[in-house]
Image (spheres, grey):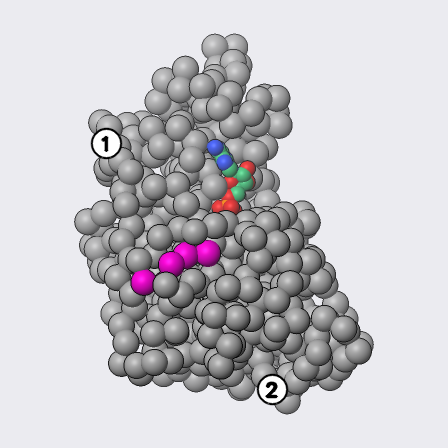
Amino acid sequence: MPLVAGVDTSTQSCKIVVRDAETGALVRTGSAKHPDGTEVDPQHWWDAFQEAAAAAGGLADVAALAVGGQQHGMVTLDADGNVVRPALLWNDNRSAPSAEALITELGNGDREAGAQAWADAVGSVLVASLTITKLRWLRDNEPENAAKVAAVALPHDWLSWRIAGYGPAGDPTAPLGPQLDKLFTDRSDASGTGYYDASVGEYRPDLLERALGRADVVLPRVVGVAEAGAVAHPSVAGGATATSIASNGCLIGPGAGDNAGASLGLGMTPGDIAISIGTSGVVSAVAPQRTADGSGAINGFADATGNALMLAVTLNAARVLDAAREVLDVDFDGLAELALQAPPGSDGLVLVPYLEGERTPNRPDATGTLHGIRLATSTRPHLARAYIEGMLCGLADGLDALRAQGVAMERVMLIGGAAQSTAVQQIAPQVFGLPISIPEPGEYVADGAARQAAWALARAADPAAAAPAWSTTIATTLDADPKPVVREQYAAVRDLA
Ligand SMILES: Nc1ncnc2c1ncn2[C@@H]1O[C@H](COP(=O)(O)OP(=O)(O)O)[C@@H](O)[C@H]1O
Ligand SMILES: O=C(CO)[C@@H](O)[C@H](O)COP(=O)(O)O
């Protein structure tokens, strides 16, 4: 049976799964770390991809692959294919004033009108995460770099291009050189740039020009759903090209933004909600039409199949628990054990977890605040529980925002690194007031990319082929009595922060 690979070039690491194209059975995996920081030289992603591919036993026997990736990161390339400056990631907040300026400008001085105009035009009210705001920041703060930009790509576009053999002129790992017109992307990741309208499937060069001051830059071609964007070059990843289908080489699928990748990996349909607790906290739902929420609570992105993907995204998720482990000097299990020793609501100890500012609500300069500290709550279990509850309350607000848009919630699935925490699993249904399904532990973004690769492979033979019917196994569904006190306490202090 042919094998396919799915890659997740995420904020903290690169993960690769190799699966059987027909059954979806997991064959092997590999991963490698990315450096910390909100501005990263993309070369690190390339190095981590190579390391992860080697850890996965190489990709020489793989017939197709696809890359899912952290959304929104601004990768600027000059005419020779060099990155102009380190990529600014989705969680880099320096462009918050640029976002505000672009909103007010589009509203001709009226912020509210501008917010709605952006939501109507591209599905999202601008926040610092979106690529377009980073381009405005570049224009205003590094004009010499802005002048060098010949192409703008996203992390998954850039990595796909490198795997296809393109890259900086003279780089021996880029034998096909700096062919910027060979960059490609997909509708899901393009929909997070702020200059692509997924409702009609077209870039908005006029909006790009507003940000960068010009629109004469190459943007990646948006390839169709499950259409191969390129063929992997034999010299990359220790021979990533498939020897098994030598006549075709190893196809590279369109790829996806990581949240659309997870949606495909989970096989989400309307009524399904995914809550991902990775570096970002994401509450997502697929919908037939893209939304235009002028309040900014919901991003109206696209998925990787032709639907819309509604997202509420927080900046403070798994790393809040990493911070708690640091403060309490415990490992993952230790944090979970401590948190489960304290009662729901932590006897009034509440963390508003804006440790990196926040995106939803839009408070880029906020810091975290601990409320309700008394002698009785100055214990390690209370603190551990407050960190977990505060992080989950941010996601519960995201669930409310989706509800307010009329989204049905028939099944709520918890994924992402911190979903492995037994304390998160047990406390989540108390905070959300809903049963929570825990899929088998896995890398659902990489799985979605693998499924897309299998789909692209099938489409190469039959243009009408449907996505392969891989199934997701729900390991357990957890229910608990809702504990409204947790959200009530949080709501009372959230806006004081
Ligand atoms: N058992 C656990 N409990 C809490 N957090 C965990 C656990 N296992 C992993 N994590 C956290 O999950 C995060 C990585 O999750 P992941 O979804 O891979 O992130 P990303 O996709 O943003 O790179 C890290 O911050 C890590 O500390
Ligand atoms: O900005 C968003 C979505 O809009 C984030 O979800 C990023 O796509 C990063 O994802 P993770 O690395 O946290 O998975």
Disc 1: which residue: 479
> In the drawing, what numbered circle is on residue 160?
none
Which residues are the magenta region? Answer: 18-22
> In the drawing, what numbered circle is on residue 181?
2
Judged from this view, the residue extending furthest toward the top is: 375
Q: Is residue 190 visible?
A: no
> Which residue is depicted at the point 72% across and 71% down?
173
Q: Position of residue 124 (x, y in %)?
A: 43, 67
Element under disc 2: helix
> Which residue is depicted at the point 47% across and 70% down?
244
Looking at marks 1 and 2 on the same chain, the residue that comes earlier in the sequence is marked by 2
Q: Nearer the viewer, mark 1 or mark 2?
A: 2
Where residue 341 sits, quadrant-wise, is top left
Q: Is residue 242 visible?
A: yes
Amino acid bearing label 2: Asp
Tell me the chief SS of the magenta region.
strand
